[in-house]
Amino acid sequence: MTLAVQYSYDNIGIRSPHRIMITGGAGFIGSNFVHHWFSAYPNDRVVVLDALTYAGNRKNLASLENNPNFRFVEGNICDRALIDRLLQEEQINTIAHFAAESHVDRSILGPDAFVQTNVVGTFTLLEAFRQYWLAQGQPDHYRFLHVSTDEVYGSLGPHDHAFTEKTPYAPNSPYSASKAGSDHLARAYYHTYGMPTVITNCSNNYGPYHYPEKLIPLMCINALLGKPLPVYGDGQNVRDWLYVLDHCRALDTVIHHGRPGETYNIGGNNEVKNIDLVKILCRIMDELAVHLPIKPSNQLITFVKDRPGHDRRYAIDATKIKTELGWAPLVTVEEGLRQTVGWYLTHRHWWEPLLSEEYQAYYRQVYPS
Ligand code: NAD
Ligand code: TYD
């Protein structure tokens, strides 16, 4: 299956060659971004720094293992000595910072790791990059891209205007609070030290390599296994779905053309209620899957206890990145979901090993029967 949309990289590579460090590059968005970057800029040096937590998977990068321009380093963003060494050794000029604890439900069960990685880890990376950037003579083409979430803005009512870059922060979960803290640090490093940081706040991503615990992969996998499709609360919560490759293209644009010290909101322009999204997924699954244990799969939809503090609606106003940098999402939710369902159908060998005993223990905690 190929996307109808073709990506063009003309006129983007004005600051290449980059020597880019991608933190969290073995995770969902990070690994898609690594692949995106190599297809756009095959001659750039790419160093992935990833701690390989439960959400990191080196197999996501398997096709690059023999590429001489690629280096994978297993390590923690809280490890200052390691970061100092890598920046020097690799003469990095760009950081794309994805590494994070990223799942709201896990942040409710145990917030500690979220503060450690998202706040302390981001601080460690910013401070290491600042010292290195100073020692290099403060080159103004260096960039620190901090990838964040729309969840820092809190929850919208049904008729509220979508989040803009000026919406006040109002995070509601330990996850979003820790991301908000890291955003403030990235902002402060520009305003205090002039370090060229750029922040992006994006909506819910979906696509290949998405870890099974998140809504869309969880529904795909459970439908394939004939297991219940658990919808929290009344299913009326709204998310703005962004296809991951559209997101990667936006981040690429921001690295090349974004103004230091600025924030750019990135959204898919695809607001959908959870229950409607799950029904669309079931329809596509019924159509594309040769064999399903239960068909039609919407019989598996089960309403379960709501998530504590569950934000009602997120929506992104992406006017700034569109008018200033010329980026807009290209993939419709129908097209992106077909791609994604197709990927989970053909990548059972990728997701099956992830349903480990540890994952089952997590699952039983969040979805007690
Ligand atoms: P993910 O959980 O799939 O991947 C996170 C990666 O970071 C993993 O590879 C993990 O091993 C690595 N990591 C975690 N802690 C680390 C540490 N201390 N040191 C080094 N590596 C570490 O997350 P994702 O969905 O790809 O999200 C990437 C970024 O985008 C995150 O910063 C997240 O907050 C943000 N974001 C994600 C979404 C989304 O819909 N997935 C939406 C908005 C923003
Ligand atoms: P999720 O993928 O966890 O992303 P986020 O919480 O960052 O938005 O969830 C997306 C939406 O789907 C959110 O409103 C919670 C809901 N949801 C369910 O209804 N059932 C589930 O099993 C999961 C994981 C999420």
Image (cartoon, helix red, strand yellow):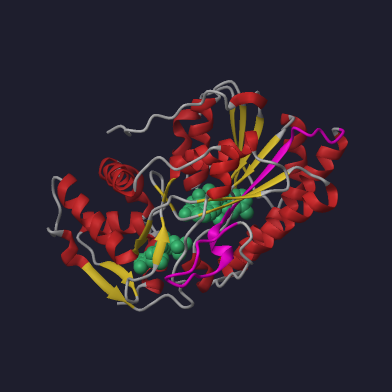
Q: Position of residue 212 (x, y in %)?
A: 38, 55
Query: Is the N terminus in the top left, top right, bottom left or bottom right quadrant?
Result: top left
Judging depth in this view, the residue of 109 and 283 nearest the camera is: 283
Magenta-highlighted stretch: main secondary structure?
loop
Residue positioned 63% across, 67% down in the render: 169
> As displayed, is residue 313 above or below residue 224?
below
> As displayed, is residue 294 above or below residue 142?
below
Residue positioned 30% across, 43% down in the render: 335
Q: Which residues are magenta?
A: 137-164
Whether residue 310 sits left or right of residue 134 in the image: it is left
Judging depth in this view, the residue of 299 and 350 nearest the camera is: 299
Residue positioned 55% across, 69% down in the render: 154
Whether residue 135 sits left or right of residue 8 in the image: it is right
Whether residue 166 sits left or right of residue 250 in the image: it is right
Judging depth in this view, the residue of 163 and 295 nearest the camera is: 163
The answer to which image quadrant residue 273 occupies is: bottom left
Q: Position of residue 157 (x, y in %)?
A: 46, 73
Residue 178 shows in this picture: yes
Q: Position of residue 161 (x, y in %)?
A: 50, 64
Judging depth in this view, the residue of 47 and 261 nearest the camera is: 261
The answer to which image quadrant residue 253 occupies is: top right
Query: Is the C terminus in the top left, top right, bottom left or bottom right quadrant?
Result: bottom left
